[in-house]
């Protein structure tokens, strides 16, 4: 059973939080000040701490800093009044998991605590897999966006307009999203206040915080028809709304991007004080895995946990040790799109389906490779062998050139001569667009 510590100087708030979370199935302890909270933290380990920003003596921000230094894995949820929303946003930059504004409902409290506990479970599972498979735990989000960490993102469209959407980590802690409620066009939203309601399993509602101030200029109508885009393509077709901003440059101070985002994750995730390598690669495309999943055959790529059975089973691997199905999937999940599409190894699969038969996750690696090949061809990446074959077909109508020597042999065998000149194949390829694809 997860244990939650609630810190607030109002007994009525403590009683309400304790009643709500106890009914949800959590073990709850309460205290009226930060000093006593620190004593409790020293004596026991909590899965999450819910604390008011304004406390007598040590403030909620000071408590946050101390706890994150001593117990960095403990998630902290801030309670704030409307006037201190700005401070709460700053607290998230310091490592707070989330915040809720007074007055809040029991469902709002349950939702944010459940999400914190679910995120903690996901991290533990990822770290356990990393230990078993010797694979580091990675986050991969577009480098050209600005983030309100673990909530929402912003993409600059023009000088005065931006697109906003749901952060991938926020989505993962909810699970399958069943619906979304977005404010109508011309609605004013404020940074740090709810801008959309996300519906998860069992009708649970989660409030998505706005990353900017502004007026809604356009709503993504696709989400009204297909909310699953928030799960499958959160940084692409799953964008939520386009916002007209008034002072985006000022609001950037509360958002993170690039190296600042990496440093934030380093503080957030290095809880075992290990010296792992962290690399920022601007060429990574986090939408690549979603793109593959939308191709026929690639649907299950995101459930791969890197056990390596596909690699151990592969006959091509026996011949060429550089060929590694597990590595190909890992690169795809990391977003190494260009490197994969330009590579030779995606064309080496023998389509024996041995890996598919043995995969415990039903990933179907052979089908995934075919999906990647389809994407490669669409974007103009083809192996030189195929280019050479098409050139031969275009010139001679067959995969090898016929000369007079071949026809003399055919004549001796009583076979008719084959035409050796150029024919209509080149025109067929030109009309079909195949030559244009190969020229990319």
Image (cartoon, helix red, strand yellow):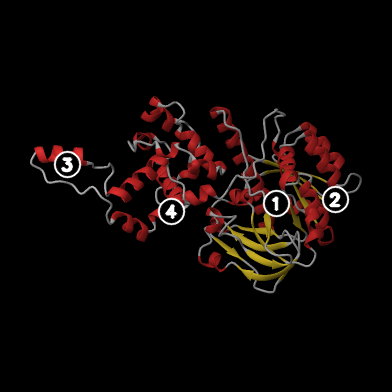
Q: Secondary structure at mark 3?
A: helix
Cα separation, mark 4 vs mark 3, equals 34 Å
Cα separation, mark 2 vs mark 3, equals 98 Å
The residue lying toward the viewer, choosing from 277 and 215, is 277
Q: Position of residue 338 (x, y in %)?
A: 54, 44
Left or right of 290: which side holds 78? Answer: right
Q: Are marks 4 and 1 in contact (CB under 8 Å)?
A: no
Q: Where, by quadrant of the figure, is residue 2 drawn? A: top right
Cα separation, mark 2 vs mark 1, equals 17 Å
Q: Which residue is mark 2?
A: 9
Cα separation, mark 4 vs mark 1, equals 64 Å
- Which corner quadrant holds the N terminus? top right
* Mark 2 nearby-residue class (10 Å; few <14, some 14–19, many ≥20): some
Mark toward the start of the polypeptide (4 vs 1): 1
Residue name at image x 31 percent, y 49 percent: 395
Cα separation, mark 2 vs mark 4, equals 68 Å
The disc at residue 385 is: none
Cα separation, mark 1 vs mark 3, equals 92 Å
């Amino acid at each position: 059973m997860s244990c939650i510590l609630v810190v607030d100087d109002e007994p009525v708030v403590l009683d309400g939080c304790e009643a709500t979370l106890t009914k949800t199935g959590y073990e709850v302890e309460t205290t009226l000040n930060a000093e006593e909270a620190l004593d409790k933290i020293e004596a026991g380990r909590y899965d999450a701490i819910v604390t008011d920003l304004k406390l007598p003596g040590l403030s909620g921000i000071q408590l946050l800093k101390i706890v994150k230094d001593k117990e960095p894995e403990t998630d902290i949820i801030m309670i704030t009044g409307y006037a201190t929303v700005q401070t709460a946003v700053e607290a998230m930059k310091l490592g707070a998991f989330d915040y809720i504004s007074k007055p809040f409902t029991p469902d709002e409290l349950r939702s944010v605590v459940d999400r914190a506990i679910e995120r903690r479970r996901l991290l533990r599972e990822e770290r356990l897999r990393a230990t078993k498979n010797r694979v580091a735990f990675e986050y991969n989000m577009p480098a050209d966006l600005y983030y309100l960490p673990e909530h929402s993102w912003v993409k600059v469209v023009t000088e005065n307009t931006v697109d906003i959407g749901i952060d991938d980590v926020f989505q993962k802690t909810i699970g399958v999203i069943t619906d979304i409620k977005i404010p109508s066009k011309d609605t004013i939203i404020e940074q740090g206040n709810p801008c959309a309601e996300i519906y998860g399993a069992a009708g649970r509602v989660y409030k998505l915080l706005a990353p900017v101030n502004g007026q809604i200029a356009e709503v993504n109508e696709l989400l009204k028809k297909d909310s699953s885009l928030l799960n499958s393509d959160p940084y692409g077709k799953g964008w939520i709304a386009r916002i007209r901003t008034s002072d985006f440059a000022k609001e950037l101070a509360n958002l993170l991007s690039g190296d600042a985002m990496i440093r934030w994750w380093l503080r957030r995730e290095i809880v075992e004080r290990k010296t792992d390598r962290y690399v920022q690669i601007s060429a990574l495309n986090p939408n690549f895995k979603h793109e593959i999943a939308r191709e026929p055959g690639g649907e299950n790529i995101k459930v791969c946990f890197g056990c390596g059975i596909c690699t151990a089973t592969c006959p091509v691997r026996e011949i060429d040790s550089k060929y590694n199905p597990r590595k190909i999937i890992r690169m795809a999940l990391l977003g190494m799109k260009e490197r994969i599409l330009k590579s030779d190894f995606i064309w080496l699969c023998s389509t024996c389906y041995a890996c598919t038969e043995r995969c415990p996750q039903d990933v179907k690696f052979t089908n995934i490779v075919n999906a990647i090949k389809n994407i490669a061809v669409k974007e103009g990446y083809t192996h030189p062998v195929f280019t050479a074959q098409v050139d031969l077909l275009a010139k001679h109508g067959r995969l090898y050139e016929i000369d007079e020597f071949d026809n003399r042999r055919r004549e001796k065998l009583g076979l008719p001569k084959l035409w050796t000149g150029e024919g209509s194949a080149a025109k067929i390829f030109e009309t079909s667009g195949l030559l244009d694809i190969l020229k990319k």
